Image (cartoon, rainbow, N blue to C red):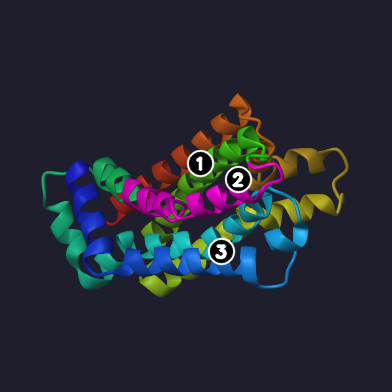
Amino acid sequence: MFAILKKELWSYFGNWSAWVIIAAFSLITTLFLFFFENDSNIFDIGIASLQSYFVLVPWLLMFIIPALSMKTFAEEQQTGTLNWLFSQPLKVSDLIFGKFLSVWVVGILCLIPSLIYLYTVYVLGVPAGNIDLGMTFGSYIGLIILIAAFSGVGILASSVSQNQIMAYLLGVFMCFIMYFGIEQLASYKLLGGADFILQNIGFYQHFLGFTRGLIDFKDVAYFALIIGVTLVLSNHFINKKK
């Protein structure tokens, strides 16, 4: 598993793709938070808070994580190296988990530059330091867990796809449905009492608790279940290709 993790991380950072993604992610968030006129601009809001960042980032991750995960298995199958991996003394579960960890690590690294935003807001607050650190750090933990969930979904999309384009589109679609689509369907209140159940199937309501600074065991368990299910399904589909 660690050999696969090292191999995947090298493939991301060795050809500059991870650096480009992290730089693009940081540039887009910087523009939206400090320069573009929009509802996320911290200066327009006038509040010493990074909550607009935590609202914006899941939407960016919805496109970035599938871009990272699309190559994990779809590219291996497209280039014919998947059969070579099968011939190695590796368990399929180790192969999947190693690739999952690599996508998760790169996704987390995308958040590192945002510590500059945290310092900026901390200093610009009146008085300095007038920021809810509990809510902020809770939101960061929520993002780290959400990245893991998106990574699991992306790995699953790659494991069932024949090429990278299909893996990317399917990954974006699945992430969108799980994060926003289910929440919107529930908001129409067409199912009566079942709307609450539908709402809790999606990512949004569980992530929302973290952005309030609440780290609830139920939310952590939910994301752990989602990650486990996506990896088990990925294991099933990859074994079928053996």
Q: Quadrant of residue 197?
A: top right
Amino acid marked by disc 2? Tyr
Q: Nearer the viewer, residue 10 or 54?
A: 54
Disc assigned to residue 29: 3
At 59% from the left and 55% from the top, the residue drawn is 58
Q: Is residue 125 magenta?
A: yes
Give the residue at mark 2: 122
Q: Give coordinates of residue 30: x percent, y percent.
A: 56, 65
- Mark nearest the camera among 1 and 2 is 2
Question: Cα distance, mark 2 to mark 3?
Answer: 17 Å
Amino acid marked by disc 3? Thr
Q: Which residues are magenta?
A: 101-128
At 13% from the left and 59% from the top, the residue drawn is 84
Question: Cα distance, mark 1 to mark 2?
Answer: 24 Å
Give the residue at mark 1: 145
Q: Give coordinates of residue 26: x percent, y percent.
A: 48, 63
Q: Nearer the viewer, residue 89 or 113?
A: 113
